[in-house]
Amino acid sequence: MMLIDTSGFFAVYSEKDKNHIPAKEAYQNSRLRITTNYILAEYVALALIRGLPREQVLTFSAEVLTDATIEIIWVDEALHTKAVELLQARQDKTYSLCDAVSFIPMRERGVTDALTTDKHFAQKVSFVCWNRQSHNFNTTEAPPGGEHRRGKS
């Protein structure tokens, strides 16, 4: 099972993304995928800001709702509250509420893979596109923003 994060969806659906090919391969090789409605909302904003055509973004938004290969975790008050509590407990971290919301069900379900380029996931899970052992995307590319530094989790 793999969590598909905002940047993972973007890499899969944007041919201009430098991680498009390895992200698409990883996505296609994962039979069980989860995401959250917070990730889907964040994807729309990211994709539009990065210049994907609105029609393409809205088509994705409609199709993902009926994609049988993706389980959408709908964030309710309890999950949102757990994520806020995680942020409050880990004020030394800079991850977002959307990330914290993802970490909760990943921990509860034992999910250790995420399709993402977000360095904050390195503190919580292993990666498909990001390889923690070699500190590289896929095999040779550095992550966006340069070298990754692992923090305490």
Image: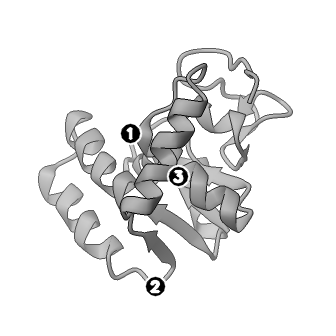
Q: Nearer the viewer, residue 58 or 65?
A: 65
Q: Look at the image and tell me in which quarter the C terminus lies.
A: top right
Q: Amino acid at mark 1?
A: Lys
The number of numbered discs placed on residues in the rendered structure image is 3
Dot 3 crowding, Cα within 10 Å, few <14, some 14–19, many 20+: many
- Left or right: 100 as drawn, with respect to 65: right
Q: CA distance from mark 2 to mark 3?
A: 20 Å
Element marked by disc 3: helix
Q: Nearer the viewer, residue 90 or 1?
A: 90
Circle 3 is placed at which residue position? 102
Residue at the spot x=37%, y=64% of the render?
A: 76
Circle 2 is placed at which residue position? 68
Residue most extreme to the right? 133
Mark sitting earlier along the chain (3/1)? 1
Element marked by disc 1: loop
Residue 14 image offset from top left, x and y in percent: 37, 47
Colouring used for the render:
one colour
Q: Amino acid at mark 3?
A: Ser
Q: Amino acid at mark 2?
A: Ala
Q: Based on the displayed image, in which of its 4 quarters is residue 137 positioned?
A: top right
Q: Nearer the viewer, residue 61 or 88?
A: 88
Residue 146 image offset from top left, x and y in percent: 60, 15
Mark sitting earlier along the chain (2/1)? 1
